[in-house]
Image: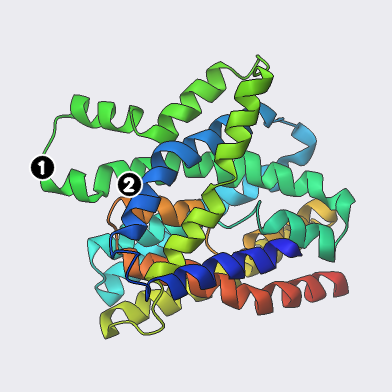
Amino acid sequence: MDNFILILIYLSLGFAMRRVPKFPSETPVVLNTFVMYVALPALVLQKIPSLHFSWDLLIPALVPWILLLIVSALIVTLGRLLRWSRDIIVALLIVLPLGNTSFLGFPMIEALFGGDWLPYAMIYDQIGSFVALATWSTILAALYGVNAAQSKVSPTAMAIRILTFPPFLALIVGLSLKAWTYPPLLQTTLDNLAVTLVPLIMFAVGFQLKFSLAGERLSPLLSGLGIKLLLMPLLVLCGAMLLGLSGKAVQVSVFEAAMPPMISAGAIAMMAGLAPRLVAALVGFGLLLSFITLPLWAWLLHQI
């Protein structure tokens, strides 16, 4: 549960430090750049070798991808009906399908369900959320980010941009080295760099966090929070009940689907210049509200 307190501390520090003149307005940009080019690739290289595929754990492996398809279709439909801008739609496509399933999910599951439930959460996170982050979110950011919107490029140039995007490149390298064991010094380096991601991103999110948004941003914010914290876990729960599925794998999948927006996905969207204030609000408010919604989902799952 200390991770909850740490997240709030990092968020509060960022929110407080934006009033200190020594921290310029460009602080979030600098921090996000470090995360995108150093911390996030280190996290990719750290996590990929630990991927373990198991046919016995198909539920937590498939649920995040099914949710990705359903939620993406819902976001596009809502965006057209409510006339959201392209930046807002793409930002929501990057942020909403993915939850904070490791840093927040693992300690919450251990605290509210027990340590023997963690393997299911790891499958959900590693095969689902994390791989989707390194592929789906990365590609969307490369295709629709600020730099991509400023100029038309050939398919070859676009492919080069995607393949050289730091987290995507780290994914390719990590997969190619999956059969090898990192030297101790390299492993220690990756571990140390990876742990900087959460404090830096939460500081940047807190620095940008505002508790009031322009009217045109209120609709996607409320819709996004409702989809992420309530609708997504409800979809998994109802789907499992219709299919007659039950057990730890189902309950963990429901609980992981209820996680607030992933911090790393928010970093990708903000780094790409896609509705950064909206993304910061989704991540920040989502984290705060999850302190209420997650215990409620855990209680409900224990009653079923």
Identified at 74% across, 63% down, the residue is 2
Q: Label 1 neighbourhood size at 10 Å, few (<14), some (14-19), many (20+)?
A: few
Residue 248: % across, % down: 84, 54
Identified at 50% across, 61% down, the residue is 202
**Of the pair 276 and 187, the residue shown nearer to us:** 187
Q: Which residue is the extreme one toward the left?
A: 151
Q: Which mark is residue 151?
A: 1
Q: Quadrant of the N terminus?
A: bottom right
Residue 241: % across, % down: 75, 64
The kind of residue tagged 1 is: Ser
Q: Label 2 neighbourhood size at 10 Å, few (<14), some (14-19), many (20+)?
A: many
Residue 114 falls in which quadrant of the image? bottom right
Q: Which residue is mark 2?
A: 141
Residue 26: % across, % down: 28, 59
Identified at 80% across, 69% down, the residue is 301
* Residue 278 in the figure: left or right of residue 241: left
Q: Quadrant of the C terminus?
A: bottom right
The kind of residue tagged 2 is: Ala
In the rendered picture of this protein, how many numbered marks are placed on residues?
2
Residue 10 appearing in the image: yes
* Residue 70 in the figure: left or right of residue 244: left
Identified at 77% across, 47% down, the residue is 120
Q: How far apart are labels 2 and 1 at the CA level?
A: 15 Å
Image vertical order of residue 135 relative to residue 258, above or below = above
- Helix, strand or loop at label 2? It is helix
Residue 183 falls in which quadrant of the image? top right
**Of the pair 215 and 81, the residue shown nearer to us:** 215
Could you tell which of marks 2 and 1 lies nearer the N-terminus? Answer: 2
Residue 53: % across, % down: 71, 30
**Of the pair 57 and 258, the residue shown nearer to us:** 258
